[in-house]
Image: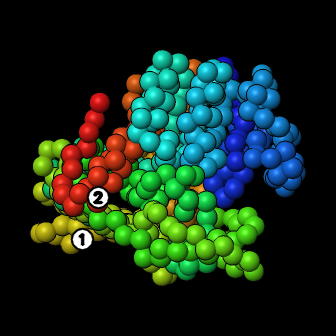
């Protein structure tokens, strides 16, 4: 039987997220064959820093390596569609960062290509794989909350608070028409749909850009960097800093979410509350080992992440015993374990626990409705194929 240690995986991109991919792959025993970067010079530098065996000079060189069976795409959004298309054509399984593509037309094409290939295809909505979120998904599925009525929450960060904060995601031609919603809001939307089993049917959205002109550094800058560049260039910003969205779900449930990359003190706070007909649950990614459970006629509960106390889905995602906090990086090991189980099987399972290209396309369609709603000031239905 093939083992994970016999699978060869290449990673495209070695920024913040790309590095997390490399480290998580190593933790679950997958062999990282090498790295592809934007330039050979950067590739050589980052390969040495990460202790990887090889820097690929091009996509062609990477895909010509017979050791590569899976490719992880962590490049800027504009490159996802062409790179994933080439990877699938070469017969390799793909794990792609979100958003899956720049437009829903591109993501629809990738869904079709992946389906025709029979290859494992995944979008890295890793927040599903905090153990307590896996526990909640099974709890809701088993009727533990009663029918879902209301889904509320936020995703707040502060890393773009100042006009001197810069990242490639701010540029529409690299990141896409939606920035805060596409970058972090998509995580909240995917997660809450996964937890409730409900798809968003229509939206009423308001998008706001509070910093219309930013000072772009003359040189490169890393994601979440706090360094201030000495030389800057003024750039007009065409993407949103903040979004507020009302949601209508299939089956009648309602929801609302606020998304911001300008919220001082919130480093990475994805929070949700799901209210059912019998009970409620609430969770925050900055305190990921605690799940609040609300009741009407008996004391509320606080469930601490503990394999001895969670249901089977929660236990399957847990990496550590109770009392040993599991965080952001641990979710990558959990989601990659689920993905590589399918790689070992040769193709996607009938109902993967991880997000597939179809799930990534779903968030692109919701994003289209968000953009149209903000433009027109009215409720817009999510247009599905």
> Closer to the camera, 90 or 307?
90
In this rendering, is residue 219 above or below 161? above
Residue 293 coordinates in the image, percent (x, y): 27, 65
The residue located at (45%, 36%) in the rendering is: 107
The residue located at (57%, 20%) in the rendering is: 346
Residue 344 appears in the rendering? no
Quadrant (top left, top right, bottom left, bottom right) of the N terminus: top right
> Closer to the camera, 372 or 366?
372
- Residue that label 1 marks: 300
Q: Determine which of the numbered discs, if any, sits on residue 119 in the image.
A: none
In this rendering, is residue 380 above or below 207? above
Crowdedness near tag 2: few (<14), some (14–19) or many (≥20) residues, C-alpha within 10 Å: few
The residue located at (28%, 35%) in the rendering is: 384
In this rendering, is residue 284 above or below 306? below
Q: Is residue 326 left or right of residue 200?
A: right
- Residue that label 2 marks: 375
């Amino acid at each position: 039987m093939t083992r994970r240690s016999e699978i060869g995986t290449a990673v495209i991109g070695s920024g913040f997220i790309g590095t997390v991919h490399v480290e998580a792959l190593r933790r679950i025993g997958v062999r990282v064959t090498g790295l592809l970067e934007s330039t050979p010079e950067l590739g050589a530098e980052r390969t040495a820093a990460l202790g990887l065996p090889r820097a690929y000079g091009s996509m062609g060189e990477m895909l010509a390596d017979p050791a590569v069976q899976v490719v992880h795409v962590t490049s800027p959004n504009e490159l996802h569609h062409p790179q994933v298309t080439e990877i699938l054509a070469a017969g390799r399984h793909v794990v792609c960062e979100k958003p899956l593509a720049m437009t829903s037309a591109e993501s629809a094409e990738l869904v079709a290509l992946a389906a025709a290939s029979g290859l494992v295809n995944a979008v890295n909505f890793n927040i599903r794989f905090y153990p307590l979120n896996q526990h909640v998904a099974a709890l809701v599925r088993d009727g533990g909350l009663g029918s879902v009525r209301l889904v509320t929450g936020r995703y707040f960060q502060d890393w773009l608070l100042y006009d001197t904060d810069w990242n490639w995601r701010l540029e529409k031609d690299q990141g896409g028409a939606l920035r805060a919603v596409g970058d972090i809001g998509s995580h909240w939307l995917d997660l809450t749909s996964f937890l409730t089993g409900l798809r968003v049917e229509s939206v009423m959205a308001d998008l706001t850009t509070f910093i219309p002109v930013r000072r772009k550094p003359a040189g490169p800058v890393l994601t979440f960097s706090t360094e201030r560049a000495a030389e800057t260039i003024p750039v007009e910003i065409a993407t949103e800093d903040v979004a507020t969205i009302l949601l209508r779900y299939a089956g009648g449930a309602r929801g609302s979410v606020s998304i911001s990359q300008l919220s001082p003190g919130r480093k990475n706070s994805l929070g949700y509350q799901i209210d059912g007909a019998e009970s409620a649950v609430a969770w925050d990614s900055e305190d990921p080992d605690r799940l609040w459970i609300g009741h009407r006629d008996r004391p509320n509960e606080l469930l601490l992440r503990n394999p001895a106390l969670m249901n089977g889905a929660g236990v399957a995602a847990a990496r550590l015993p109770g009392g040993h906090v599991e965080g952001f990086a641990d979710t990558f090991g959990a989601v990659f374990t689920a993905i590589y189980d399918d790689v070992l099987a040769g193709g996607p399972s009938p109902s993967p626990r991880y997000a597939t290209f179809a799930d990534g396309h779903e968030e692109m369609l919701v994003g289209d409705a968000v953009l149209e709603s903000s433009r027109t000031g009215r409720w817009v239905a999510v247009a599905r194929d």
